[in-house]
Image: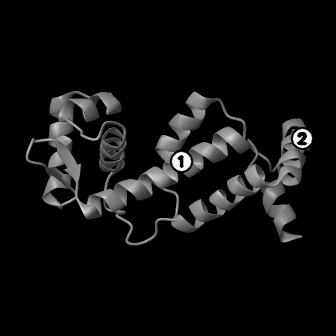
Amino acid sequence: MLSGKRHRDLTASHEHYLRALFKVRSERGYARLADVARELGVAPPTLSVGLKPLEARGLIAHDDHRFLVLTPEGEHVARAVHHRFAVIHAFLRDLLGMPESVAHDEACRLEHELSDSTADRLVDLVKMTREDAVARDFFSLRFAAYRRACAPEASCSACDLECLTRSAAL
């Protein structure tokens, strides 16, 4: 887990910018504004404006060639966001069987809200099912066939999860 100070005051967009910059630099060894903008699907001027607060906070800078770089603190934040994304993505795709595009889009939204402790437990679950063939086979077979069967109840409007809270209390 990448623990430490969480930058909860960063917007989801800022976290996306940091993660995209991290990804582009990791793949290419350098990152131009246009490369990061392309990765994010935004116009370079939009990205330029969005990066200013990150630069002011000392999370990104420019090198001698005017390429974008993450400062040590910026890299720490980018790695933490990337870690949460990867964990959620693996959970959705590998355990829940979500299609790749759905897993990616959902992970992009959820990466900003997931706590470090929840990410740690999801890592444990994903790793356990990858490393333990018995657990993996049991989970995949049981989960693939499982469909909840809720009894119609007057108190259940669009499944208020009363069945979960009731069974958790038992």
Category of crowding for the residue at label 1, using alpha-carbon neighbours closer than 10 angstroms: few (below 14), some (14–19), many (at least 20): some
Numbered label attached to residue 39 = none
Q: Residue at x 14, y 48 (%)?
A: 52
Image position, residue 147 (x, y; %): 87, 38
Q: Residue at x 66, y 38 (%)?
A: 93
Is 119 above or below relative to 21?
below
Q: Is residue 111 visible?
A: no
Q: Residue at x 81, y 55 (%)?
A: 132
Q: On the picture, is 106 further left or further right than 133?
A: left
**Which is nearer the N-term, disc 1 or disc 2?**
1
Secondary element at tag 1: helix
Q: Amino acid at mark 1?
A: Ala
Image position, residue 36 (x, y; %): 27, 35
Is 59 above or below relative to 35?
below
Q: Pick whichever, 50 or 93, lies toward us.
A: 93
Category of crowding for the residue at label 2, using alpha-carbon neighbours closer than 10 angstroms: few (below 14), some (14–19), many (at least 20): few
Q: On the picture, is 65 further left or further right than 114?
A: left
Q: CA distance from mark 1 to mark 2?
A: 24 Å
Is 63 above or below relative to 124?
above
Q: Which residue is mark 1?
A: 86
Q: Are marks 1 and 2 in contact (CB under 8 Å)?
A: no
Secondary element at tag 2: helix
Q: Pick whichever, 106 or 79, lies toward us.
A: 79
Q: Which residue is mark 2?
A: 141
The scheme the figure's colours follow is one colour
